[in-house]
């Protein structure tokens, strides 16, 4: 298990910003959270970019993973079953050891008390699901699950027998080739998830943008769409991002500590209102 993050010193000005954001959240009609790798840093999973990022350390992987899967799915499966790329091994090991942190738990609690309508995550780490988020859209897939390329049905890993001499495995429903649910570079976002993401974004008048560099599309367009429609967008990130200048509010600090504080404030606000 990852070591607990160092205690985050909350400076006074942030206290006022947090109080204002808590009011915005309770005044909003439909709040959606868009999360990225930064939310899982406190669970021991490195981000992709910036200091300590996987791509910073190992270089960006080839952008044609999906094309290579389509050309030779058996070879892609052999790579999946015993990865050779250093970044893939590093990611696999940290995913296996990771557990939800205070940030994941706070978002699940925000949903439970009715202040958050949906979580759209770019993370494949399954930690939102483990923390109890229910209206959860995993736009880049889930590393644990498998997916049929033809009927787009998803499967728990033990629901499909993997025979290393007969790859790729086939969908028990339609016979189509099955791959990992993780969306590879060059792969279109599965239409069922993308449709639901846009439906949530269109309903949203307030979006939390947490732990993302907001550089990968289509997810990076979601906060812009909320702003275009007159909604507010609150960024939570220890550093500035490409999106900061557009954000309605930008809170500096680690997601775990800030979301926990925001939840406490929102609960006392709701309590005061009750
Ligand atoms: N709390 C909040 N944010 C944090 C924390 C933290 N404790 N630590 C780092 N961050 C921020 C960084 O400052 C950075 O802005 O998280 C962000 C992580 O950005 P990226 O590494 O670019 O991750 P993400 O935005 O999720 O990447 C999008 O790119 O490589 C693809 O498919 C991959 O889903 C991924 C997509």
Image: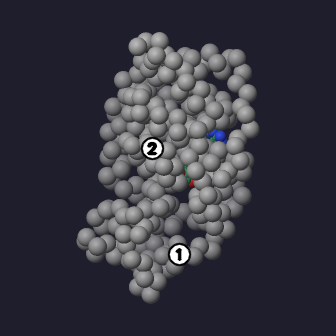
- Number of marks in the image? 2
**Ligand 1 placement by image quarter:** top right
Q: Residue at x 29, y 73 (%)?
A: 172
Q: Residue at x 46, y 16 (%)?
A: 271
Residue 98 x, y percent position in the rendering: 60, 54
Residue 274 appearing in the image: yes
Q: Residue at x 40, y 37 (%)?
A: 118
Judging by the rendered image, the residue that carries numbered circle 1 is: 81
Q: Which mark is residue 256?
A: none
Mark 1 to mark 2: distance in Å?
29 Å
Judging by the rendered image, the residue that carries numbered circle 2 is: 132
Occupied quadrant, residue 4:
top right
The residue lying furthest to the bottom in this view is 165
Instruction: Give 127 or 58, whichever is nearer the viewer.
Output: 127
The residue lying furthest to the left in this view is 174
Residue 207 x, y percent position in the rendering: 46, 31
- Label 1 sits on a secondary structure element that is helix
Q: Residue at x 45, y 44 (%)?
A: 132
Instruction: Give above or below for 63 relative to 112.
Output: below
Instruction: Give 78 or 227, whichever is nearer the viewer.
Output: 78
Residue 215 x, y percent position in the rendering: 55, 44
Instruction: Give above or below for 4 relative to 66.
Output: above
Occupied quadrant, residue 91:
bottom right
């Amino acid at each position: 298990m990852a070591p607990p993050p160092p205690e985050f010193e909350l400076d006074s000005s942030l206290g006022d910003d947090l109080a204002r954001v808590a009011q915005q959240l309770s005044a909003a009609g439909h709040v959606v959270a868009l999360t990225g790798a930064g939310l899982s840093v406190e669970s021991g999973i490195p981000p992709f970019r910036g200091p300590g990022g996987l791509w910073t350390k190992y270089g960006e992987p080839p952008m044609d993973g999906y094309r290579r899967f389509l050309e030779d799915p058996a070879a892609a499966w052999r790579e999946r079953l015993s990865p050779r790329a250093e970044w893939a091994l590093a990611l696999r090991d940290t995913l296996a050891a990771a557990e939800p942190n205070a940030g994941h738990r706070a978002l699940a609690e925000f949903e439970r008390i009715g202040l958050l309508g949906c979580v759209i995550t770019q993370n494949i780490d399954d930690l939102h699901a483990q923390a109890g988020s229910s209206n959860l859209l995993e736009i880049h897939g889930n590393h644990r699950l498998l997916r049929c390329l033809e009927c787009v049905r998803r499967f728990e890993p033990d629901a499909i027998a993997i025979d290393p001499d007969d790859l790729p495995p086939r969908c028990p429903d339609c016979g189509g080739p099955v791959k990992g649910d993780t969306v590879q570079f060059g792969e279109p976002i599965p239409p069922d998830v993308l449709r639901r993401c846009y439906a949530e974004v269109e309903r949203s008048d307030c979006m939390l943008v947490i732990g993302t560099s907001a550089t990968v599309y289509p997810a990076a367009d979601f906060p812009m769409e909320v702003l275009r429609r007159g909604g507010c967008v609150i960024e939570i990130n220890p550093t500035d991002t490409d999106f900061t200048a557009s954000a309605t509010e930008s809170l500096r600090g680690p997601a775990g500590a800030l979301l926990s504080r925001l939840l406490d404030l929102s609960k006392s606000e709701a309590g005061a209102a009750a």
